[in-house]
Image (tube, rainbow, N blue to C red):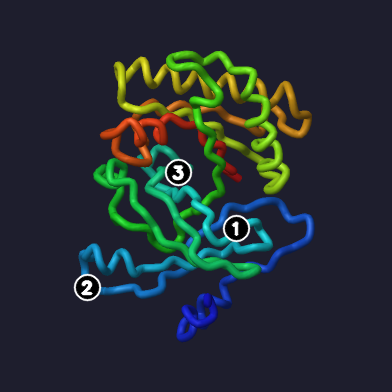
Amino acid sequence: MIRSLLSGHIGLVLLLSAVEAGAAFTPPRIIGVVNQTDSGSLSAAELADRRYVIDKGQVHSVNRGDVLNVYREVRLSRRIPVPMRLFIGNMTITDAQQQSSIGLFTANARIMSQSVIKYKTAVKGDIVVPRLILDSGVLFDPGSYELKPAAAEEFAKVADFVRLFSPAKLVVEGHTDSDGEQMDNMRLSEQRSQQITKYLVDEYDFITPSMVEAKGYGEAQPIVPNNTPENKTLNRRIEVIVWE
């Protein structure tokens, strides 16, 4: 399937990275666009038909059906020499071969509305990273950051996820729905991510304090609108992200 989509795009194939035994994890990147248009602003139909070629595939544990986070590197100030990664949406892998894959991008409308994001869809060079989503309701009681006893089973999934990718850096993100005060939600998400980070470091010797970072975003990054109880449940989550 990917070969047929890439026909006429031979230059993209030359950019696919070879897998080296024992090589350190490097985040996947978008290296090309299939069904690209030069018509200026894209219609909804054009965006729906756009596919992105990613330089990692099954060998790197990127498989069909996976949903990955997409980040753009943006330099916010000339005084800051290192660009920041800004979350812009998700990539659903629609086809995967050994060393490459193709995905469909879904933008995070709230993030894309910010003026610092110039291009309102994914572009060549954007970073596409693996993530694991945990249901906050399984880990915590409402409004609490104390772990439930059942959390241990969920953290076994995190351990398997980390072993799969062997990252140099792991980010644990806390997210809430929009119920309650914004600052309270931010604080709760930070406390939860810190609690999870502490557990992982204490429980697994291959997860060290220097490789894991805790972040809380409160209600700022919903994956669906907070307009139904079901959607709010989806937004109350923990994301474990392979950062580098």
Residue 179 higher or lower than 106, as above or below:
above
Residue 100 point in image, percent of width and height: 58, 68
Q: Which residue in the protein does label 1 denote? A: 62
Mark with earlier residue (1, 3): 1
Say which of marks 2 and 1 sits in front: 1
Residue at 37% from the left image edge and 58% from the top image edge? 122
Say which of marks 2 and 3 sits in front: 2
Residue at 56% from the left image edge and 41% from the top image edge? 132
Residue at 66% from the left image edge and 42% from the top image edge? 161
Residue 163 point in image, percent of width and height: 73, 43
Q: Report crowding for label 2: few under 14, some 14 to 19, many 20 or more residues within 10 A (C-alpha).
A: few
Q: Identify the mark at residue 39; answer none if there is no mark.
A: 2
In the image: residue 113, left or right of residue 213: left
> Label 3 is placed on what type of residue?
Arg
Mark with earlier residue (2, 1): 2
Q: Secondary structure at mark 3?
A: strand
> Label 2 is placed on what type of residue?
Ser
Residue 87 higher or lower than 14, as above or below:
above
Say which of marks 1 and 3 sits in front: 1
- Depth order, front residue of 10/101: 101
Q: Which residue in the protein does label 3 denote? A: 85
Q: Secondary structure at mark 2?
A: loop
**Mark pair 1, 3: CA separation:** 21 Å
Mark with earlier residue (2, 3): 2
- Depth order, front residue of 31/158: 158
Residue at 65% from the left image edge and 56% from the top image edge? 61
Q: Report crowding for label 3: few under 14, some 14 to 19, many 20 or more residues within 10 A (C-alpha).
A: some
**Mark pair 2, 3: CA separation:** 28 Å
Q: Report crowding for label 1: few under 14, some 14 to 19, many 20 or more residues within 10 A (C-alpha).
A: many
